[in-house]
Image (spheres, helix red, strand yellow):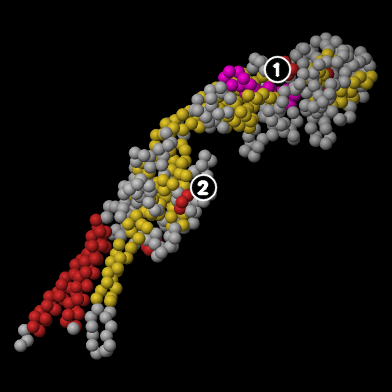
């Protein structure tokens, strides 16, 4: 029995070594297969039990496949933007097309040699379709991203072109501080601007439009009193410089200035003296301060015609000019306040409404009465999108509330270009506009829109985003790849095409983003080579061949023993 048993044992050895050489052969033949994972032969003995300790019955050997799926292959550089490799744990999710054109159940692979086919789908060299999470218009992943049903074939065929409507724009420039001021009541919708700048913006159809920004310097839209040239403190027009003193025609004369709810202040303090200068009067008015905010509330100057001009700094505050001692103070014109300012002559005046502010003034910054501008935003047809007043402080910077990004965005809403494009909203940042002496100077203008661009390529980045590039320089993220991880990747079942299928031994999949959790990092423009070690395979091949020869020797020896047995007479 033992002679025949040794024969069968040798035969099982031949079968086991045949399996081993087959695995070695398969490994060697797939040395250049992208993402291939080697298989080793492991052997297990099969023992035949006996009822006696003195007798021996030979068993056999069983060959077992030992997968090395979790062993990393080296990464090799590729020139294709859609070639990807994984450094670390995980698999790309793919599907095969069925005979009916539908996609099969999910499979998993490390073979990342993907290219775009005729239908716009990304497929690897084995024909499997790459799966990913579709991104919405804001670039967000689907809510059910943990479920594999949330994955879709990465197809870019529908992205034939891309238009990017302008949603933000900005202008950095300097306005001429000494520009002639236009009375704010005369700044009408059809005014001739002091300076105009156009910026090309794009609508939802990809058509460009010249958005015009018009600037007009205006007088302060605040309560303003201007003394007549025949103001009795002034003997004649003052041009160029102030007189050293005011002629002492009426010593002790005084008038008062009251701004808003503050108490009236006598000017000059203590009454006119023989040495009081016009500069003294201006300094006293310009020093009037709100004790609560410590902000200056009035501004006095001699205008180009030699008239004394007194202005409230803050819109909405009254200026009351009242005679205290001496002849009545003559006032020829004034601006607006919460209500008309008090004056003694010549009678009521009509005050035009103040233009709306583009943005609220900075509450901690005293408005500059000499830094007011009207800014209009217009379509190419001349229609006003929005219009408003802006103020620049004494340092030449915009005196308006800024957001956390240090921007002053002006909301241009419901813009209708008249060409069938969707109505458009643009946040236009004017924080970079200044007012300094010198000429108008445009430093830069920016906007985030783009004209129609045709798709020129597709790429996959290190974060797994499938991105389409366009001829207008823009790009659009369409999908994000999911990385499937398993508790025991060596338990996956190998399928034709260098793909694997989930089994009970591997555990259930976990979908993760690249580089998160236990998922590996995507290496764009790279491919993972086979993890087959040729030197190791050749060494195992020699051992396998010797083992096979030894088993054949056992068979021939057993045959001789049986022949000897049959020759016994």
Residue 37 appears left or right of 421: left
Tell me which residue sits at (58%, 29%) in the image.
424
Does the magenta segment cover residue 11? no
Where is mark 1, residue-wise?
187
Estimate the spatial distance between the alpha carbons at disc 1 and disc 2, rounded to whole Å. Answer: 52 Å
Residue 453 coordinates in the image, percent (x, y): 44, 30
Residue 317, placed above or below residue 115: above
Residue 5 image position (x, y, % from top left): 20, 80
Q: Residues within 10 Å of mark 2 (few under 14, many from 20)?
A: some
Secondary structure beneath disc 1?
Answer: loop
Helix or strand or loop: what does disc 2 sit on?
loop
Q: Earlier in the sequence, mark 1 or mark 2?
A: 2
Which of the 4 image quadrants contains residue 338? Answer: top right
Using the image, determine if residue 311 lies above or below residue 475. Answer: above
Screen quadrant of the C terminus: bottom left
The question of residue 370 being in magenta is answered with yes
Displayed quadrant of residue 390: top right
Foreground disc of the pair 1, 2: 2
**How far from the left and from the top, in percent, is residue 407?**
63, 34
Residue 142, numbered label: 2
- Label 1, residues with CA under 10 Å away: few <14, some 14-19, many ≥20: some
Please report the residue visible at 81 percent of the width from the left and 16 percent of the height from the top: 350
Q: Quadrant of the N terminus?
A: bottom left
């Amino acid at each position: 029995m033992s002679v025949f048993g040794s024969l069968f044992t040798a035969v099982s050895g031949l079968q086991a070594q045949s399996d081993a050489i087959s695995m070695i052969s398969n490994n060697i033949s797939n040395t250049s297969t992208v993402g291939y994972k080697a298989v080793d032969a492991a052997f297990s003995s099969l023992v035949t039990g006996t009822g006696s300790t003195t007798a021996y019955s030979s068993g056999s050997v069983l060959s077992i496949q030992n997968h090395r799926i979790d062993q990393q292959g080296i990464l090799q550089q590729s020139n294709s933007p859609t070639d990807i490799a994984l450094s670390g744990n995980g698999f790309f999710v793919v599907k095969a097309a069925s005979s009916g054109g539908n996609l099969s159940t999910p499979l998993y692979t490390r073979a990342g040699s993907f290219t775009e086919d005729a239908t716009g789908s990304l497929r690897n060299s084995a024909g499997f379709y790459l799966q990913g999470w579709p991104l919405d218009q804001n670039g967000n992943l689907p809510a059910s991203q943990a479920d594999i049903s949330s994955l879709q074939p990465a197809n870019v065929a529908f992205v034939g072109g891309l238009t990017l409507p302008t949603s933000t724009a900005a202008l950095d420039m300097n306005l001429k501080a000494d520009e002639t001021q236009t009375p704010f009541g005369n700044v009408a919708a059809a005014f001739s601007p002091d300076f105009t700048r156009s910026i090309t913006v794009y609508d939802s159809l990809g058509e460009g439009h010249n958005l015009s920004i018009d600037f007009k310097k205006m007088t302060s839209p605040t309560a303003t009193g201007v003394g007549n040239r025949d103001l009795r403190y002034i003997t004649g027009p003052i041009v160029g410089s102030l007189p050293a003193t005011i002629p002492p025609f009426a010593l002790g004369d005084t008038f008062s200035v009251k701004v808003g709810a503050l108490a009236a202040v006598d000017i000059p303090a203590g009454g006119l003296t023989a040495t009081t200068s016009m500069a003294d009067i201006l300094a006293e008015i310009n020093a009037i301060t709100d004790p609560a905010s410590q902000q200056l509330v009035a501004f006095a100057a001699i205008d180009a015609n030699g008239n004394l001009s007194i202005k409230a700094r803050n819109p909405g505050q009254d200026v009351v000019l009242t005679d205290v001692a001496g002849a009545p103070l003559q006032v020829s014109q004034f601006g607006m306040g919460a209500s008309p300012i008090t004056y003694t002559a010549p009678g009521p005046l009509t005050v035009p409404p103040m233009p709306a502010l583009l943005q609220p003034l900075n509450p901690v910054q005293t408005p500059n009465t000499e830094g007011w501008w009207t800014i209009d935003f217009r379509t190419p047809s001349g229609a006003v999108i929005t219009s408003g007043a802006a103020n620049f402080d004494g340092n030449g910077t915009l005196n308006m509330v800024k957001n956390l990004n240090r921007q002053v965005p002006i909301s241009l809403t419901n813009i209708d270009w008249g060409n069938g494009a969707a109505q458009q909203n643009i946040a236009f940042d004017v924080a970079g506009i200044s007012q300094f002496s010198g000429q108008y100077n445009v430093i830069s203008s920016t906007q985030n829109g783009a004209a129609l661009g045709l798709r020129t390529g597709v790429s996959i980045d290190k974060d797994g985003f499938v991105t389409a590039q366009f001829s207008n320089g823009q790009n659009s993220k369409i999908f994000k790849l999911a990385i499937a991880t398993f508790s025991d990747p060596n338990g996956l079942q190998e399928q034709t095409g260098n793909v694997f299928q989930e089994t009970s031994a591997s555990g259930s999949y976990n979908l993760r983003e690249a580089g998160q959790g236990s998922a590996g990092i995507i290496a764009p423009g790279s491919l993972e080579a086979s993890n087959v070690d040729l030197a190791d395979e050749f060494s195992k091949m020699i051992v396998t061949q010797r083992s096979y020869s030894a088993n054949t020797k056992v068979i021939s020896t057993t045959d001789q023993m049986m022949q000897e047995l049959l020759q016994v007479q």
